[in-house]
Amino acid sequence: MGKKQFKAESKRLLDLMINSIYTNKEIFLREIISNASDAIDKLWYQSLTDDSVGLDRDEYRIRIYINKDERTITVSDNGIGMTMAEAESNLGVIAKSGSNKFKSEIDSAQAEDVSIIGQFGVGFYSAFMVADKVTVLTKKFGEEKGVKWESKGVDGYTVEEAEKYRSGTDVIMHIKEDTDEEIYGSYLEVWKLKALIKKYSDYVRWPIVMDITRTEKQPTEEKDKDGNHVMQNVTVTAPETVNSMIPIWQRSKADVSDADCAEWYKETNRDQNDPAVTLRINAEGSISYKALLFVPQKEIDSGISGATKHKGLKLYCNGVLIMDECEKLLHDYFEFVRGVVDSPDLSLNISREILQHNRQLKVIGQNLEKKIKGELETMMRDDRPKYEEFWKNFGIHIKCGVCDEYGRYTDFLKDLLIFSTGEESMVSLKEYADNMPESQPAIYFCSADTIKHAMDLPQCEDVRNRGYEILYLTSPIDETVLTTVKSIDGKPFVNIVTDDLGFMTDEEKKEAQEKSAESKEIFEFMRDSIADENLKIVMFSSKLVSSACCLTSAPGGMTLEMEKYFRNAPNEEMRKLRANRILEVNGEHRAFKAIQEAYDADDKEKAAELSKILYVQAELLAGLEIEDIASYTELVTKLF
């Protein structure tokens, strides 16, 4: 029996696959088990029309044996097996998949009923990541002789006839010796293999059986004073099925209630609360998949300091785990969604990096996002308190999504946005637009630390007096969100603090400009008296009704809200950043008239002191910190 060489391209691919395609060595068991499952699928499919197979469905199984003395792991199945030619073809040419060939040979109607995992053809060779020698003992159903295929990796393989009692395949992996970098011997522990099966292959449809050693209490011949047999601990080793086989998302709604799904969610995500939304999807078509998705009630705390944040759905192919967290399936704005996606149309034996750019995966992701958005819109419409609670916990994700990639996802997400119009009321942008009077020229908003503070801003008074609602923004990102959305039904967003409200006619604007020009001298005096380098202009306001003053920021630069945000920054230079300010005064208010009277009476000291007090009051109304509280207090006490 001479050694045969892999083809040159196969040898290069084997080396590449071991070192590059799979970066996670533990998936070798997933791949070998998946191949065994495929082999059983094929024989079971044949048994539907061939009575000579002689196996009932519950007789198929995958057996795993560990031999620590010989450092071997054996994965054995009672599936279809391989002939000599098939062993050479499937195992001697890397990336040639027998499963793919089998599926292509049956007609399309039959293919829908056959679930074959290994369609890429390199999964078997992942065994060489942990094994220095792999032996395959196989016998095709209906054949007299078996086949032994053996290889130590890239140096080639041998293949010969062999005796085998029954059809099926045994994959015997001789585990490498331990190194400083890798403890390969851990794969020879029962607990380790059970954990890998639970993680990756728990939902393979056929039983995966291992010999499990347990300690049990058994009666002895000895009896106690009451005549009962004395119990003793006995170590028992017996075969046990270690996989669940049927995942909850593969079962029908008639068999699994939403309550069952909620319990499964809480167990798998370590969440004490029921999910806010349960979404069950069964999609059939050019790309088929099943999904079980959940929106939590609130962010789930891992309970581990410094733990990596969860991101992505679990991705399966026919119940076999491909990725524990598939980050590219959903965009970041839906990263709070938990759950699983299972598709028979994905290639199991493919790298994480390639899969993340898979076209089919993108289509599935797009469809899932539409379903999630639709479910959230239904919640907003039918259960507003529940949606507002969701928004409190996860709204920031939607807001960031609106702003991400220069507004690429704005049109998709904007219908999910809600904002406060009072301390107890919130509206979507569509609801706001639907409630607008026909005369309203724009959508008005203002920003502050709290809703109450925003409502108390003096600039709000004129807007509310006209019967127009105001969106009160309290998050640093809110203004950016509205800037990205730009408009609703053709109505622009207007910041009542910094923008022209659009209430004044051209004639009224002209009169205001003439009045400001006449008061230029006192405005310059007030600015110079206040002596704040960030105060650029003092002017009459067109927005004030009963308040004496307000503070705004110069157009096109940093806003007052940005200044407040930067004051809490960790960087000292950022904390020093200040907006260029405009002091707007109400020319009809007695506070300004008092300044005017003192100035006209040539009592410049009093006029200067009153100007400083007015400026600090404007800062307080804007929610800004006072730089010199002692000086302000001294000025106020002089008024008594």
Image (tube, rainbow, N blue to C red):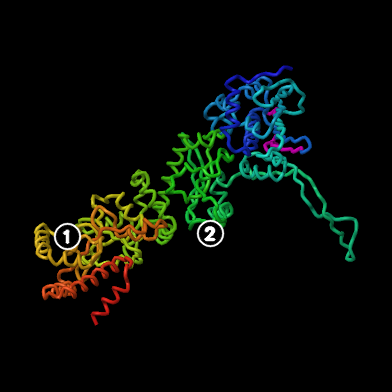
As drawn, 341 above or below 336: above
Q: Is residue 5 left or right of residue 225?
A: left
- Write down the residue under mark 2: 273
- Residue 513 seen anywhere in this rendered image of the structure: yes
As measured in the structure, the alpha-carbon distance from the residue carrying label 1 to the one carrying label 2 is 50 Å
Residue identified by numbered label 1: 503
Q: Which residues are magenta?
A: 51-67
Any part of residue 475 in sight: no
Dot 2: what SS? Answer: loop
Corner quadrant of residue 434: bottom left
Local SS, label 1: loop
Q: Which one is in front, 126 or 634?
A: 634
Quarter of the image containing the N terminus? Answer: top right
The image quadrant of residue 516 is: bottom left
The amino acid type found where label 2 is placed reads Asn
Q: Residue at x 65, y 21 (%)?
A: 88
Type of residue at label 1?
A: Phe
> Where does residue 70 sit, x and y in percent of width and height?
77, 35
How far from the left and from the top, in percent, is residue 338?
51, 50
Point 21% across, 70% down: residue: 611
Query: In the image, which is nearer the foreground, mark 1 or mark 2?
Result: 1
For marks 1 and 2 on the same chain, the one whose residue lies earlier in the sequence: 2
Task: Specify whether 79 is left or right of 542.
Answer: right
The stretch drawn in magenta includes residue 303: no
Residue nearest the viewer, comparing 392 with 255? 392
Q: Position of residue 511 (x, y in %)?
A: 9, 62
